[in-house]
Image (tube, rainbow, N blue to C red):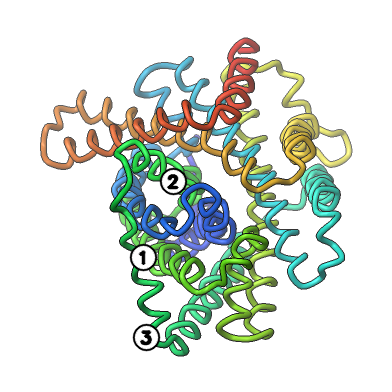
């Protein structure tokens, strides 16, 4: 039986909030991670990838309304290529969720450490403990709500705009030139270096896939609600991510960029608006990041439950707790692996960012390619179809580059995916 009208409570604004609470967190850690790879060319590559993000977002609108039952990459890939390919897509998005849980928890405590510096030495321990607390809350049965998402998304977006406004209001001509020059740092590099930077910058838009998970809760007409929500996501990301990246790379001193790469945005807030703005950034960033970590835990164990239902994972994974009626084994698995990742990576954001690439881009490729296959069967040969094929090729190139360049991500993601597929 499909969702009833009463269960579809998400209008486009609430749907935007839920997605922004996921995708909007990347601006807090991606500029620092990318800076470690491409230095001052970071804004250029984020801006370059923004175009690809917009094209892929347009495809996710259709993926969402074509699959009102939800399920994201698992559902669309199953419809396009069959159950085993859907299972593989599920494994890829699970790897993405594991890394989202880990990197969001670490980044959240990194931002707290920018105010309480004594905590810096204990970020790994705090992050592992934080994920453990989230596991306990999920076993007890505490859930996130769209209303909380709305408050946090709006707070984060408003604070980001305050930082941008404070920066533009106080910048002199030299600083303007420094910022604008960073947006054009694409010359003087080889084609391969351009591709590597482009592939790495996709991390700035992780969380895009969450829109396709919301379909069962979104109001009818589903196509209209999805379109409006995604347009809002595109607009809010375009006016925050590339601009905040350019401002942080262009304005922050070189020494600060070398030592505080985990928290560029709070340091930018301090530089342009003083302690009050910095505290606002830290409060919204840390809370949103920990919220995103919890969202990823929920997403991963729901994928496990879907794979159990499809007969791909043992039924024991879906066993429910006798006291709280929650799938405690699935929750433990969904949190144990991120804790292990945090511990083994020692909370190094660069390492976590590199590991992130495998599942993220893999899920993008499977979702985009699956929609192309479905459109082909329906006889679509218009401009929109070929633009979608171009988008798929673009994401496939990015994934292929990352498979070669980020070997740790390939080994980790490949191992998790292989174990999952062998179990299936």
User: Depth-wise, is mark 3 or mark 2 nearer the camera?
Assistant: 3
Label 3: element kind: helix
* Residue located at (32% from left, 50% from top): 223
Who is closer to the viewer here, 388 or 242? 242
Label 3 close to label 2 by CB (< 8 Å) = no
Q: In the rendered image, which quarter is residue 409 located in?
A: top right
Who is closer to the viewer here, 56 or 273? 273
Label annotation for residue 235: 1
Measured along the vertical axis of the image, is residue 122 above or below residue 374? Answer: below
Disc 1 versus disc 3: distance between alpha carbons? 27 Å
Disc 2: which residue: 202
Q: Residues within 10 Å of mark 3 (few under 14, many from 20)?
A: few
Q: Is residue 355 visible?
A: yes
Label annotation for residue 209: none
Disc 1 versus disc 2: distance between alpha carbons? 17 Å
Measured along the vertical axis of the image, is residue 93 above or below residue 228? Answer: above
* Residue located at (39% from left, 69% from top): 239
Residue 275, horizontal then vertical, whole percent: 68, 84
Q: Residues within 10 Å of mark 2 (few under 14, many from 20)?
A: many
Disc 3: which residue: 173
Label 1 close to label 3 by CB (< 8 Å) = no
- Which corner quadrant holds the C terminus? top right
Number of marks in the image? 3
Measured along the vertical axis of the image, is residue 117 above or below residue 139? Answer: below
* Residue located at (72% from left, 59% from top): 110
Q: Mark 1 or mark 3: which comes first in sequence? A: 3
Label 2: element kind: helix
Q: Mark 1 or mark 2: which comes first in sequence? A: 2
């Amino acid at each position: 039986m499909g969702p009833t009208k009463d269960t579809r409570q998400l209008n486009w604004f609430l749907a935007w909030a839920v997605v922004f609470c996921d995708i909007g967190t990347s601006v807090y850690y991606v500029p620092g991670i990318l800076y470690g790879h491409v230095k001052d060319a970071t804004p250029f590559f984020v801006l370059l990838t923004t175009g690809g993000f917009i094209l892929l977002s347009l495809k996710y609108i259709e993926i969402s309304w074509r699959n009102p039952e939800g399920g994201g990459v698992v559902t669309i890939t199953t419809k396009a290529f069959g159950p085993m390919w859907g299972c593989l897509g599920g494994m890829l998005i699970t790897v993405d969720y594991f890394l989202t849980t880990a990197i969001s928890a670490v980044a959240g405590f990194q931002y707290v450490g920018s105010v309480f510096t004594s905590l810096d030495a204990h970020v790994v321990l705090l992050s592992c403990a934080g994920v453990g607390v989230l596991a306990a809350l999920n076993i007890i049965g505490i859930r996130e709500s769209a209303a909380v998402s709305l408050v946090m998304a709006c707070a984060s977006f408003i604070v980001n705009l305050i930082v941008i406004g404070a920066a533009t209001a106080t910048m002199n001509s030299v600083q303007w030139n420094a910022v604008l020059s960073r947006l054009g740092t694409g010359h003087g590099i080889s084609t391969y270096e351009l591709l590597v930077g482009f592939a790495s910058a996709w991390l700035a838009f992780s969380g895009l896939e969450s829109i396709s998970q919301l379909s069962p809760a979104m109001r009818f007409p589903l196509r209209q609600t999805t379109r409006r929500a995604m347009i809002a996501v595109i607009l809010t990301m375009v006016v925050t991510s590339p601009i905040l990246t350019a401002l942080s790379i262009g304005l922050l001193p070189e020494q600060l960029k070398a030592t505080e790469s985990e928290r560029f945005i709070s340091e930018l807030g301090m530089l342009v608006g003083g302690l009050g703005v910095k505290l606002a950034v830290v409060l919204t960033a840390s809370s949103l990041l920990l919220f995103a970590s919890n969202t990823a835990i929920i997403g991963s164990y729901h994928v496990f439950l879907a794979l159990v239902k499809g007969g791909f994972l043992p039924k024991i994974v879906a066993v429910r707790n006798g006291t709280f009626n929650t799938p405690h084994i699935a929750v433990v698995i969904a949190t144990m692996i991120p804790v292990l990742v945090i511990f083994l990576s020692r909370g190094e954001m660069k390492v976590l960012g590199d590991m992130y690439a495998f599942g993220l881009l893999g899920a993008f490729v499977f979702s985009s390619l699956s929609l192309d296959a479905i459109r082909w069967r329906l006889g679509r040969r218009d401009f929109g179809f070929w633009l979608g094929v171009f988008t798929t090729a673009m994401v496939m190139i990015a994934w292929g580059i990352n498979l070669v360049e980020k070997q740790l991500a390939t080994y980790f993601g490949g191992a998790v995916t292989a174990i999952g597929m062998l179990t299936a």
